[in-house]
Structure formats: structure tokens, C-alpha cells
Amino acid sequence: MNKMKIKDVINIIESFAPLSYQESYDNSGLIVGNINDELTGVLICLDSIEEVVDEAISKKCNLIVAHHPIVFSGLKKITGKNYIERTILKAIKNDVAIYAAHTNLDNANKGVNYKIAEKLGLKNCKPLSSKAGFLKKIVVYCPIEQAENVRLAMFNAGAGAIGNYSECSFNINGEGTFRAGENTNPFVGEKDKRHTEQEIRIEMVAESFKLHQVIHSMIEAHPYEEVAYDVYSLDNTLNNVGSGLIGELNQEESELDFLKRLKKDLQTDCVRHTKLLQNKIKRVALCGGSGSFLLNDAIKENADVFITADFKYHQFFDAENKIIIADIGHYESEQFTKELFYDILTKKITNFAVHLSEINTNPINYL
């Protein structure tokens, strides 16, 4: 039986939340450790602070999977002068790797925001602000008889998915010409003679993080010695990938009843909110963590309430009686991310311990 390595856990997480989904300011990925180290156990947390490293050591886990990266910007010295440096030193000394999936997990389909929506019982969910720039179009030219094998290879590598549809492609018949050189071994035609072949132009889209594998599989299945293909960057948005979420309640609720349920279901000690508008709550927008940048998107989507964290005093005025802002606290909005990590990993890992951290890393307390 092959022994599991740290990189195997990383591959599981990144197949769900590719690093390409993270925001430009973020630092998701492996922060401390060696991907080729043999895995002894996984500890899941929201913040990888010193106490969590101690917990990992006590539970014989040499990989911490966190939501928030312990390092956001470059460290010039690691002397233990603050909690970040002390955490890094302790992890390195004890051979504990630290991995973070932050905004890539926020933006992923069925990611952090969907877990919050699940707690609130929302339906018809979609991103509040969809992302663009993640799609590529691959075009390849292939002899007619071998075209289906090439298509299948590309589909199996992850190409051809559009929304809830799979195996999507466009195909055009045409003629291709080429002259094989002296040092070639042509699949059809003869050396030093121009050859005309009836071919199919196959087009399909793929997410950028799958592109390498799609091209590799395409070339492996293609009969030609030299494969002619093109790759185009697309500006299309990915409708299932993006920031925040908008969904609907099964039934309308009064504003006060909803806010009370929000406090209970999301296990928060404090809900800071704008004034009640005497409307019913049906459409709910939300964003785990600091989501004030999405307020205008929530208003454009005709949401009745926008749930997030870290709104500043003057930003509450921006609601302008068009929507209720409900600030539930940063930690509180993301605390269920641990459950999300656990679900992702335990579906694939059955022979290693996956632990949820018992440390409450919320730095904010309420009287």
C-alpha cells in the first residue's frame, strides 16, 4: 500500500479550490513544510496560531490545514518577536507543515459561502459577483476517424464543461494540408509530398488550472506526430465561481425573526445591523469574512439583507435604506469552514486521521 504524502492532501483541496481562484493579495498554498513528507495526520483550523501547532503536535498531525494564511506578506526576519514568527518557528522545529486555502476556498463552487447558506437553509444559490478570466478555449485539428478518441481524452481531463453541462464541444469538418520532412514518421501521407487530409476542428473550453492536463491528454490520444492546436484566453465569467453568494429562503420571514434566527443558526454573540425597514426577508446575500466590497452587488441583486463582517462605522450609511446590513463578526462568519475542509478531505481520505481543531482562535470576545 502506498504511503500518503502531504502533497496528496494538497491535491485533494486544490482540485476543489484551485490556487488560481485566490485574490491577488492572498497567500494561499503551502506556507511551511515539504510536500513530499509522509503524512501522519491532518489538523483543520481557521487560524494556524501557536496553540494550534501545539495541538497538532499532541495529536501527532504533521499537517495543519487552515483557512487564514499565517503569513500574508514577506517575512524579512524570523526571530520570534511576534505571534506569526513564533508560529512559523514552532512549526519548522517540529516538522509540522502549514497549508492555507483562503480566498480560493471563498470563491470556489460550493465553497465557504455555500456552507453558510446551508446553515441558513437558502436555495437557488449563486455567486454574488462571478469571476472572469479563468476560462481557456482549446482548438485542435484531427483526422475524422480518430476525432472521438481525442474528444474523449479531453473530456476525461476536465475540458468541455459549461455550467451544469459536460462533454460540450463544437466540431467543423475541413481539409488540412502538410508536407512531412525528411526526419519525420507521418501518420498519413508520404515524406516530402504535400498531403491533404479530411480533418475535424474540435473546440472546447476548460478552466485554466486544468489546461496542462487537457493538452497532455489531447496529445497522448492524437495520432499525429506533431499536433496542431491553439489556446485562447476568454473573458467569459464562470457563473459558479466568484465572491459572495445570493440565495432565497423557502418562506419569507420578518426582519426581526430572521435576525434572531441568524444569531442562533450562525452561533454568533452579536449581530450589528442597520435599521429595520419593515419589509419581509426573502432574498439573502452573504459573504464570509470581510465582504463590505460586495454591498453594491447585493443591492443590485435586490437582496433584502446582506450578511458579512468587518463593516466600518461609516460604511453602514451606504445601505441607504435599500437593504439591511447584518455584520455577524469575522470569525463567526467563517467558523463553519472547518466543516467544509473536513467534508472535502474525509470523502477522499479514509486511512488517516483528520481532526477538527478544538482551539477557539477568535481574538474577539464579547461581554
Image (spheres, rainbow, N blue to C red):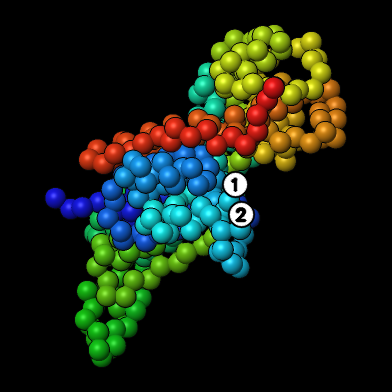
What secondary structure is marked by label 2? loop
Residue found at x 41% / y 41%: 55
Q: Amino acid at mark 1?
A: Lys
Q: Confirm or deny contact between disc 1 and disc 2 (CB under 8 A).
A: no
Closer to the chain start, of discs 1 and 2, is: 2
Q: Amino acid at mark 2?
A: Asn
Q: Which mark is residue 82?
A: 2
Q: Position of residue 263 (x, y in %)?
A: 62, 18
Q: Residue furthest bottom?
A: 182
Q: Is residue 245 above or below residue 69?
A: above
Residue found at x 67% / y 39%: 290
Q: Is residue 26 left or right of residue 13?
A: right
Residue found at x 31% / y 45%: 60
Query: Relative to the observer, which residue lies in front, 22 or 135?
Result: 22
Q: Which residue is mark 1?
A: 131
Query: Relative to the observer, which residue lies in front, 213 or 45?
Result: 45
In front: mark 1 or mark 2?
A: 2
Q: Local crowd at mark 1 within 10 Å, few (<14), some, or many (≥20)?
A: some
Quadrant where the image shows the C terminus: top right
Q: Marks 1 and 2, Cα distance to the nearest angstrom?
A: 36 Å
